[in-house]
Amino acid sequence: MRTAPATNPARALLRRVFPQLRGRILHEPYRSAYAHSLVTPVNLHFLEELATRIERLGIPGDIVECGVYQGGSAAVLGATMARHGKERKLRLFDSFEGMPQASERDGEFSRKIQGFGVSDERIVRAVLRRAGVPAERVEIAVGLFEDTFPHSPDHPVALLHVDCDFYEPVLLTLRKFYPRVSPGGFVVLNDYGTFKGAKEATDEFLAEQGLDLEPVMIDPGAAFFQKPGDGHGGLPDAGHYPGWKGPIA
């Protein structure tokens, strides 16, 4: 007699205990995000929260990501943006040639991963398409930051995701785009707690701008802060992760 195949116990547990989590993992944009991103799941979900929050707060400007890899985090940002009106654009910057050469301000680990993370604009566009991000709302600048940033239009920015790991590109990104971040907008520093150069560049930039604030950790690697001004001082409750005991503001 033929017997039925045994039930996968892990899958059964997931279906029984975590139905909401299961729904998020198995559906877009998270299906693509988890497969095409090096960003942690907590950070991916918090990016969705911030992309929702700029709508709730009425913060003007586009969403900018510097350091795209295969487009996983861009898919979360773009899909969230697409659910809220038609005013914003998703602007992405990457050389797609992998990690650049690290500087003397970066740690030893950074110097060992030069060239890691090679990708392709076509991969990113395919990931965004699967996640339901409208192509006409996406702009991708391919090349080194020092070559592409000067040609970037001076549009306001509501959310800036800095995911470029090393001292020089992080500092270049903050100097280029932070002046364009709208008051009350958010800056996410994906590597603040992980890469020595990213933290030093951020701290140096905040000091030179006279900003007396400390980035709030999202998880052990990523951090964020809100640009002060125009009545948006202070951080609203995240309200996105019931029961989360970590250091999310």
Image: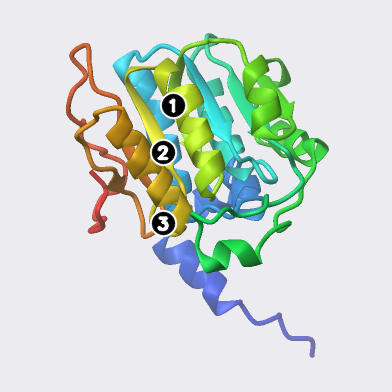
User: Residue shown at 45%/49% (left/top)?
Assistant: 198
Residue at the (48%, 23%) spot, across then down = 177
Using the numbered discs, state the Cα–Cα distance from disc 2 to disc 1 in whole angstroms.
8 Å
Quadrant of the image for the C terminus? top left
- Asked if 128 appears above or below 37 in the picture, the reply is above
What's the residue at 72%, 36% (across, down)? 130
Placement of 21 over or under 57, stated as above or below: below
On the picture, is 155 further left or further right than 130? left
> 27 left or right of 127?
left
248 or 85: which is nearer to us? 248
Q: Which mark is residue 221?
A: 3
Vertically, is 7 above or below 148? below
Residue flagged by tag 2: what amino acid is it? Val
Horizontal and vertical percent position of residue 106: 51, 57
Give the spatial CA distance, label 3 vs label 1. Answer: 18 Å
Q: Residues within 10 Å of mark 3 (few under 14, many from 20)?
A: some
Q: Residue at x 53, y 75 (%)?
A: 10
Which circle marks residue 188 in the picture? Answer: 2
The answer to whether the residues at label 2 and label 1 have Cβ atoms under 8 Å apart is yes
State which tag comes first along the sequence, 3 or 2: 2
Quarter residue 133 falls in: top right
Q: Looking at numbered disc 3 in the image, what kind of residue is underneath it?
A: Gly
Q: Give me the disc on residue 159.
A: 1
Quarter of the image for residue 112 reads: bottom right
Residue 65 coordinates in the image, percent (x, y): 56, 32
Ranked by sequence position, the earlier of labels 2 and 1 is 1
Q: Position of residue 178 (x, y in %)?
A: 42, 24
Percent position (x, y) of residue 144?
70, 35
Closer to the camera, 167 or 243?
167
Say few, some or many: other residues with alpha carbon within 10 Å of mark 1 (under 14 / 14 to 19 / 20 or more): many
Q: Nearer the viewer, residue 237 or 17?
A: 237
